[in-house]
Amino acid sequence: MSKRVVLFGASGTIGRAVARELRLSGHDFVCALRGSSNIPEDLAGYSVKPGALADVFDREGFDVAISCIASRTGAPEDAWAVDFQANSDILKAAHTSGVRHFVLLSAICVQKPGLAFQHAKLAFEKELIESGLTYSIVRPTAFFKSLSGQIERVRSGKPYLLFGNGELTRCKPISDRDLARFVVGCINDPERRNRILPVGGPGPAITPLQQGKDLFRLTGQKPRYRRVPMALMNVIVGALGLMGLVSERAAAKAEYAKIGRYYATESMLVWDEKAGRYDEAATPEFGTETLFEHYRKKLG
């Protein structure tokens, strides 16, 4: 069933994929961009409304709001301004204008919060759940883009960077297109309403070491690794944290270092609180595209 949809965050990687999927699915939709956002070339021909948030809801009626917005840096000020406050403003305007369903792109890492952006996302999730609107909170695992940063490094003959032994973490990566299909599918699927929805791509779960091995195989390069001891990362985080007590710049760097350490030590899978471990089997799978297929396409 076609719905009238407003999409926030269409200028981002996943937001653009969601816009394409909305079009393929036959929904009537508008991409709402902040006034300062440039309209991406691949949104040419779409209905795009840059400007103030209130203007989008005042001029048009919508059945569904989808938010794919996220802070760019994850730093505390940015996180609370975007992951919480901007989403909160959207929710209030949506509620006032008669929107009935809100789809939120969150992140699976909020299940073990230790960083500012995770707490900001959780705060908004709580507000959404208590808002009275029907909701779908999508918590995806790792994106292909975040796991593709070392392709050119390996292609050029440099070693693949690993934290520890490269097997500290695992994930079920999900492609932009598969995630967009899942998000758009929340619009009409009653089984996805009023639920928190963790989702990954096709399994099995893979480690950073497996990702490196596949890149070396695809490029024909001799495997070479540079291992970064976790003890060294802990020292860096601690030192920057102390410097951050007297320097805002150092405090920001300390937060980035904490984010890096988090992703180096925590798996992007469903967390089993009772067992105290990540559960691959409990992490839902969706879609057909695998990270290794993505690597092959990127490498030509």
Image (cartoon, grey):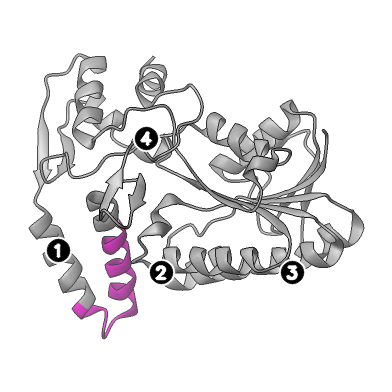
Mark drawn on residue 193 = none
Mark drawn on residue 92 = 3
Q: CA distance from mark 4 to mark 3?
A: 34 Å
Name the residue located 89 percent from the left edge and 53 percent from the top edge: 61
- Is tag 3's residue or tag 2's residue first in the polypeptide sequence? 3
Overall secondary structure of the magenta section: helix
Q: CA distance from mark 2 to mark 1?
A: 18 Å
- Is tag 2's residue or tag 1's residue first in the polypeptide sequence? 2
> Which percent across, then down, holds residue 53?
76, 63
Name the residue located 11 percent from the left edge and 34 percent from the top edge: 225
Q: Amino acid at mark 4?
A: Lys
Name the residue located 39 percent from the left edge and 19 percent from the top edge: 293
Residue extent of the magenta highlight: 242-259
Which element carries disc 2, helix, strand or loop?
A: helix
Q: Is residue 52 visible?
A: no
Q: Is residue 238 magenta?
A: no
- Is tag 4's residue or tag 1's residue first in the polypeptide sequence? 4
Q: Which image quarter: residue 95?
A: bottom right
Mark drawn on residue 116 = 2
Q: CA distance from mark 3 to mark 1?
A: 41 Å
Compared with residue 10, is residue 242 higher up or lower down, i.e. above or below? Answer: below
Q: CA distance from mark 4 to mark 1?
A: 26 Å
Which element carries disc 3, helix, strand or loop?
A: helix
Q: Please say if the residues under marks 3 and 1 sit with CB atoms less than 8 Å apart.
A: no
